[in-house]
Amino acid sequence: MAAKRMDLNMRTFLVLSGSSNPLGQTLALQLCSRLAPGSVALILDDDKDKLSALEQLLRDQLKPDKVKLRTGKLDEQHSNGVELMEQALQQASSGSFERSIIVHNEGLAATEVLMEPQLSQDWTAYVQQQLYAPVALNQRWLHCKQLTDVQKLAINVTSSLLVRPLIHGGLLCSCKRARDMYFRAMASEESRHNVHVLSYAPGLLDSHQTQCDINGNVITPESLVASPQIQQLPRVQPLQATLKLINILEEISFVSGHDVDYYDTFVL
């Protein structure tokens, strides 16, 4: 596959799923500010208060009427994402947009402490929210009639750390790895339909909160990884990670289906 660059200043239907974390907030602001007039941005999350605060921030920061903002509160299992997207597209015609971008920024630790869920229903619920629901939303986005013949870009926010086998993190790592494989397969299957896929790892964010194990001991990401190379990597601000992603899209270029890490320094 050839390397690809993208000018974000186009009439776009943007879907951002997972916006209440610091990276999601900067992704929403930076992407929306670059879209052309006539664009529509659908911001999804399961935290109503943070979703409302982000909506107000976007309305304060963006030029009036440049981008039509839509927000949608996801239910506990994120099973209503497809319905929320279809509602946002109801008034759109087949020629409304030049491009559509979907950003999958979903992802939470399985528990507040570093210990795997003990009940089978908790495992099932977590996989539904973090794997099945994003895949279902993405599949519907691929086949929306309002987006027929529209160039599409899917961005999977992944992690070079969380796809490794980590203590206390088997469920989280498994879902991350499965999602990565889904997007790689999608890149191959949909390449002939003008669909592009980028899996982006934003680095170790400076905003990462330390967690505790079941005994109350403080655990940091570095203590879970034996690799000295990873331990020495600098922490990243959410804005830095977001601007690097935009730079990859607009200036550096990427190969559809490939993984790109914040710490990568190569130019394709």
Image (cartoon, grey):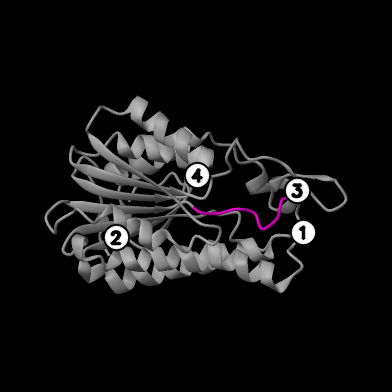
Q: CA distance from mark 2 to mark 3?
A: 36 Å
Q: Is residue 110 magenta?
A: yes
Callout 3: few (<14), some (14-19), or many (20+) C-alpha neighbours within 10 Å?
few
Alpha carbon separation for disc pair 1 and 4: 29 Å
Q: Earlier in the sequence, mark 2 or mark 3?
A: 2
Residue contact at pointers 1 and 4, CB within 8 angstroms: no
Residue flagged by tag 2: what amino acid is it? Answer: His
Residue 255 drawn at (x, y percent): 32, 58
Looking at the rendered structure, the secondary structure element under dot 3 is: helix
Which residue was labeled with disc 2? 196
Give the amino acid type for the residue marked by disc 4 in the picture.
Tyr
What's the residue at 58%, 67% (across, down)? 127
User: Secondary structure of the magenta portion, mostly?
Assistant: loop
Q: Earlier in the sequence, mark 1 or mark 4?
A: 1
Identify residue for label 4.
263
User: What amino acid does circle 1 point to?
Assistant: Met
Lower position in the chain sequence, tag 2 or tag 4: 2
Residue 30, given in percent of the width and then of the height, sits at: 36, 35
Marks 1 and 3, how far apart in space? 15 Å
> Dot 1: few (<14), some (14–19), or many (≥20) neighbours within 10 Å?
some
Front residue (pair 200, 251)? 200
Sooner in the amino-acid sequence: mark 2 or mark 1: 1
Check disc 1 and report the residue beneath it.
115
Q: Residue at x 21, y 68 (%)?
A: 193
Residue 223 disc label: 3
Region of the chain picked out in magenta, as a range = 106-112
Measuring 36% from the left and 70% from the top, which residue is drawn there?
Answer: 186
- Report the side of 8 relative to 165 (left or right): left
